[in-house]
Image (cartoon, rainbow, N blue to C red):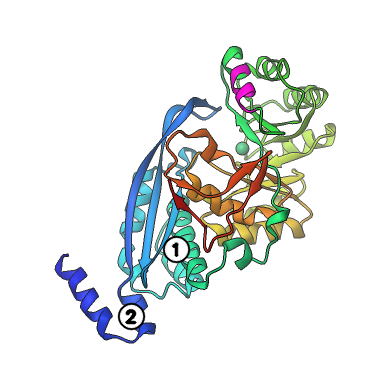
Amino acid sequence: MNRRDLFRTVLGAALPLSVRSASVSQLETEIVRLKLRHTWTTVMSSSEYRDTFHLRFTADGVTGRGEGAPIPRYKETAETARRAIEAVKDRITSSDPRQFSKLLDDVFTHIQGEFAAKAALDIALMDWNGQKLGVPLYRYFGLDPNDAPVTTFSIGIDKPEIVRQKVREADAYPVLKVKVGLKTDEEMIEAVRSVTSKPLRVDANEGWTDKEEAVRKINWLEKQGVEFIEQPMPAHMLEETRWVRSKVHIPIIADEACLHPEDMPRLASSFDGVNIKIDKCGGMLEAFRMINIARSLKLKTMLGCMISSSVAITAAAHLSPLVDYADLDGNLLIANDPFEGVLVKNGRLILPNRPGLGLLPR
Ligand code: MG
């Protein structure tokens, strides 16, 4: 124990509980390397592992855990997330974690960008508060766990024989999400369709820059039993996307175009729905706000994820009873998940009925 920890412990023991809780808080950060079951390829990148940022917040003998997956598109890394939190560590540990809204508002004004870092802190504080209150987080938000939707299982871009193998391995999932947007779109879908007739959802990750091409591809995908298409064109091409939307029949969902609550009103005329991610917006509280704003704009709502462990995926899953679609499979794509949290049974998300996130170490 160093002098600072000793001081905190001695001080903590001498103070009344209300004051003590804030003075003995501890915060630890860690970068965890998650190994992928398959090499993961999308329009943006190809990799065999992902580093995510983890955070443990301890006070009153309770530890809340959080995780954020840095998104390379926004120039975030696990290391920048860690530095962002380390720079405001004292501000966090000297605040009352029960007043998490105030704490997060204050801390976030001192962090530019770094939404994975913000997500990890928000999740850890929500986990801590759920445990202190003795309620699972879905109950904290007033939700019915039986309303949790089916999650898609994602098939990354790959050679046809590998795609067929991935689809066979995904036998337990009733709906698949297929990544397209490179030159191999038809090949990808045909490989999937050669082994399954399940409903498909397709994510182009901004891959098509020509609006006529986007319409052609979407109309072809509709014939292949695709339910909706995510982010067909680059995020800034809202006019073109509105035109595409007027020429196709299946819903168009915004992902890269929809980062924060203030984005949503201007998206409502170009898209039918939005994909909200905790790592992208900076936490469960912000995601909850976004879901409610989207619903008020009559947009379909989807909760998506990055590749991450059960910490971040379970956080999103606790909000999933509120949304129309879930794509919360990031933990299923990795081989070394340190926790068990949300489970998937016949494709449906099963929320843990334990306080906070309800995580169990593996
Ligand atoms: Mg997407």
The percent position of residue 299, horizontal first and vertical second, equals 76, 51
The percent position of residue 339, horizontal first and vertical second, equals 45, 47
The percent position of residue 31, horizontal first and vertical second, equals 34, 45
- Write down the quadrant of residue 87 in the picture: bottom left
Mark 1 surroundings: few (<14), some (14-19) or many (≥20) residues within 10 A:
some
Q: Is residue 114 visible?
A: no
Disc number at residue 228? none
Residue identified by numbered label 1: 108
The secondary structure making up most of the magenta span is helix
Residue drawn where x is 47% and y is 74% of the image: 98
In the rendered image, residue 169 lying in the magenta stretch gets the answer yes
Q: Is residue 248 visible?
A: yes
Question: What stretch of residues is rendered in magenta?
Answer: 164-170
Vertical comparison of 171 with 347: above or below: above
Q: Is mark 1 within 8 Å of ligand 1?
A: no
Q: Amino acid at mark 2?
A: Arg
User: At numbered mark 1, what does the secondary structure look like: helix, strand or loop?
Assistant: helix
Q: Amino acid at mark 1?
A: Phe
* Residue placed most toward the observer, 278 or 181: 278
The percent position of residue 360, horizontal first and vertical second, equals 46, 52
Give the side of residue 182 with respect to residue 74, left or right.
Answer: right
* Residue placed most toward the observer, 193 or 117: 193
Q: Which quarter of the rendered picture does the N terminus lie within? A: bottom left
* Residue placed most toward the observer, 168 or 222: 168
Residue identified by numbered label 2: 20
Give the side of residue 181 with respect to residue 62, left or right.
Answer: right
